[in-house]
Amino acid sequence: MGYERFTRKRHALDTLPQVFADHRMRGNETDETLIVELYQQIGKLKVQLDWLKKKSDLFGIEEKRSWINRGHGNLSIVQQCALAGLF
């Protein structure tokens, strides 16, 4: 009984460092995957924003002003004006 417990303890001590190392490596891979996905999303959003800015040139200033929402929770009036191409 004592030898068996010693063997299990020895096995645990031998394998635990690898278990934690594997976990850290998986975490890094997950972080890298997330970073790649976020950069892809940023690129896609930039292309969409550039497209919208070009299209906004087709509208007059009064039309663009009507797009401004003073009560918008996420975009300030200045940000909305910049996105609409008002300045």
Image: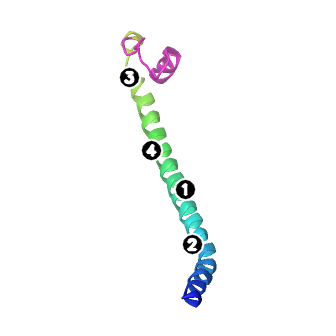
Q: Is residue 49 above or below residue 31?
A: above
Q: Which residue is mark 1?
A: 31
Residue at 61% from the left image edge and 85% from the top image edge = 6
Of the residues shown, which amino acid type is indicated by label 1?
Answer: Asp
Of callouts 3 and 4, which one flags the residue occurring earlier in the amino acid sequence? 4
Of callouts 3 and 2, which one flags the residue occurring earlier in the amino acid sequence? 2
Please state the horizontal and vertical placement of residue 36, each as a whole percent of the image: 52, 54
Please state the horizontal and vertical placement of residue 74, each as a whole percent of the image: 46, 23
Front residue (pair 82, 10):
10
Question: Which mark's residue is nearer the viewer, 1 or 4?
Answer: 1
Of callouts 4 and 2, which one flags the residue occurring earlier in the amino acid sequence? 2
Of the residues shown, which amino acid type is indicated by label 2?
Answer: Val
Q: Which residue is mark 2?
A: 19
Quadrant of image for the N terminus: bottom right
- The answer to whether marks 4 and 2 mark residues whose Cβ atoms lie closer than 8 Å is no
- The answer to whether marks 1 and 4 mark residues whose Cβ atoms lie closer than 8 Å is no
Name which quarter of the figure residue 59 lies in. Answer: top left
Q: Is residue 65 above or below residue 23?
A: above
Crowdedness near tag 3: few (<14), some (14–19) or many (≥20) residues, C-alpha within 10 Å:
few
Question: Which mark's residue is nearer the viewer, 4 or 2?
Answer: 2
Question: Which mark's residue is nearer the viewer, 3 or 1?
Answer: 1
Of callouts 1 and 4, which one flags the residue occurring earlier in the amino acid sequence? 1
Question: Which mark's residue is nearer the viewer, 3 or 2?
Answer: 2
Of the residues shown, which amino acid type is indicated by label 3?
Answer: Leu
At mark 4, the secondary structure is helix
Of the residues shown, which amino acid type is indicated by label 4?
Answer: Lys
In the rendering, which numbered label is found on residue 58?
A: 3
| Magenta span of residues | 66-86
- The answer to whether marks 3 and 1 mark residues whose Cβ atoms lie closer than 8 Å is no
